[in-house]
Amino acid sequence: MVKLDRIEHIVTIPEGVSAEISEDGVVTVTGPKGTLSRTFQSTFMSLLQDGSGLTVRVDVPRRKQRALAGTWNAHLNNMVKGVTDGFTYNLKAFYSHFPMTMAVKGKTFTVNNYFGERVPRTADIIGDVQVKVSNKTEVTVSGIDKEAVGQTAANIERCTTVKNRDRRVFQDGIYLLNKE
């Protein structure tokens, strides 16, 4: 196998977006939709800022260091995309007999009358994520932090899991349709 002496990933910063790196490794990306901050610390990797964007560099990388460099690159690209475009997950509720009702109350998402249950099921909304219910069955989860949006959508989907029933027969629930 060929040994690489250096890996560099370049993250381009578009017009209208600014990125700053503090001395303790906190990267702050500011754009038209908001501001995101994340800590990047490693003893063998360096994060540099040049005119066109940010550079993730590792000298004489091993396998785990190469993987971490790619992970940092993906996190930085997601931060840039989040402050420019944002992330949106679309979910839809399916039910056969008992019509479930969904509502957003503060930082919790509640599902009432799931399979005729009297106790409502709840899911946590993480961070500054907006959750909207439209047409009684469509749920839209949107925000600038990809991890918070994805985890909130997963929480909503997970709160309607079927227990002690056959999943092939009892297919009621809230499911992810697409990501934007």
Image (cartoon, rainbow, N blue to C red):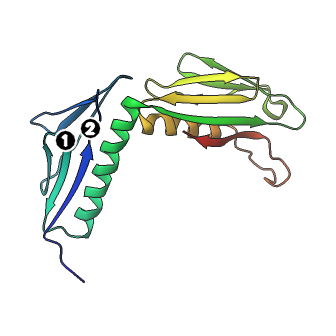
Residue at figure coordinates x 19%, y 41% from the top left:
52
Residue at figure coordinates x 75%, y 29% from the top left:
137
Question: Viewer-proximal residue, 42 or 84?
Answer: 84
Q: Position of residue 150 (x, y in %)?
A: 51, 39
| On screen, residue 112 above or below 159 | above
- Which residue in the protein does label 1 denote? 52
Q: Position of residue 135 (x, y in %)?
A: 76, 23
Tell me the crowding category of disc 1: few under 14, some 14 to 19, or many 20 or more residues within 10 angstroms, Cα based: few
| Whole-number angstrom distance, CA of label 1 to CA of label 2 | 6 Å
Tell which circle, 1 or 2, labels the residue nearer the N-terminal end.
Answer: 2
Q: Does the rendering let one see residue 122?
A: no
Confirm or deny contact between disc 1 and disc 2 (CB under 8 A).
Answer: yes
- Which residue in the protein does label 2 denote? 13
Q: Position of residue 125 (x, y in %)?
A: 52, 27
Q: Residue furthest front?
A: 15
Residue at figure coordinates x 26%, y 70% from the top left:
63
> Could you tell whether 126 is left or right of 141 in the image?
left
Which quadrant of the structure image shows residue 45?
bottom left
